[in-house]
Image (spheres, grey):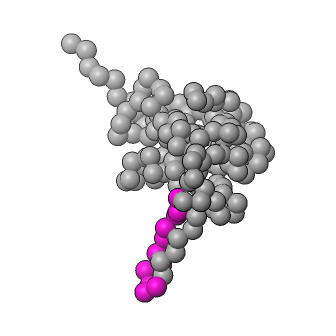
C-alpha cells in the first residue's frame, strides 16, 4: 500500500526567486507570489507545513491596477479611538508606499494564522530594480500573465 508523501520541516529545500512587477496586474501578481510562498508550485507541497520559497518583488511602483481602482479603491484603517477611521485611496498609496500595496495583496491570499504569517515573512518587496539579496543567488521567475 502506498502512502501519501508528507514533507518534514528539516528536508524542505528553499530557493530564492526574483519577480518583476513591471506592468503586471496587482491581483495576478499577488496570487502567483502567494502560491510560491506557500509552496504550491512544488511537488512536495504539504498544506500544514511551510514548504514555500523566498520571493523578491522588484519594481513595486510599476504594478498596475485596472479600471478606476487608483481613484475608487481605498485602504481602510482604524486607530481604535473614536473618530479614528481613516481611508486612503490606492492612488495615494501607490505614490507613497507601493511596497505596502503588494504586501497587503499577497498577505490577504495567505492563510490567516501562524503558518501564513511565517510564509509572509519570506517575501521582500522593493520599489526599484535593486535589492540587497544578490548573495542568495535568486533565479528569475517569469509570470504566466
Q: Is residue 52 visible?
A: no
> In this picture, is 9 found above or below 96?
above
Give the image location of residue 21, x and y in percent. 66, 41
Question: Is residue 79 inside the magenta stretch?
Answer: yes
Give the image location of residue 26, x and y in percent. 57, 45
Q: Residue at x 69, y 63 (%)?
A: 96
Question: Is residue 69 inside the magenta stretch?
Answer: no
Give the image location of residue 39, x and y in percent. 47, 34
Give the image location of residue 142, x and y in percent. 64, 28
> Is 145 left or right of 135, judged from the image as shown?
left
**Residue 93's image quarter?**
bottom right
Asked whether 82 or 58 is in front, the reply is 82
Asked whether 78 or 48 is in front, the reply is 78
**Residue 71's image quarter?**
bottom right
- Residue at the far front: name it: 68
Q: Residue at x 48, y 28 (%)?
A: 41
Q: Is residue 81 visible?
A: yes
> In this picture, is 145 found above or below 101?
above
Q: Residue at x 58, y 45 (%)?
A: 66
- Residues in magenta, as a range: 73-83
- Residue at the far bottom: name it: 82
Amino acid at each position: 500500500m502506498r502512502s501519501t508523501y508528507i514533507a518534514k520541516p528539516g528536508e524542505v529545500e528553499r530557493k530564492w526567486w526574483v519577480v518583476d512587477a513591471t506592468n503586471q496586474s496587482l491581483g495576478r501578481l499577488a496570487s502567483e507570489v502567494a502560491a510560491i510562498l506557500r509552496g504550491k508550485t512544488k511537488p512536495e507541497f504539504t498544506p500544514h507545513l511551510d514548504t514555500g520559497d523566498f520571493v523578491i518583488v522588484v519594481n513595486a511602483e510599476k504594478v498596475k491596477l485596472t479600471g478606476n481602482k487608483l481613484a475608487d479603491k481605498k485602504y481602510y484603517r482604524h486607530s481604535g479611538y473614536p473618530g479614528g477611521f481613516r481611508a486612503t485611496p490606492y492612488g495615494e498609496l501607490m505614490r507613497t508606499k507601493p511596497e505596502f500595496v503588494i504586501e497587503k495583496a499577497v498577505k490577504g491570499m495567505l492563510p490567516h494564522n501562524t503558518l501564513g504569517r511565517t510564509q509572509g515573512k519570506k517575501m521582500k518587496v522593493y520599489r526599484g530594480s535593486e535589492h540587497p539579496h544578490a548573495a542568495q543567488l535568486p533565479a528569475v521567475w517569469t509570470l504566466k500573465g
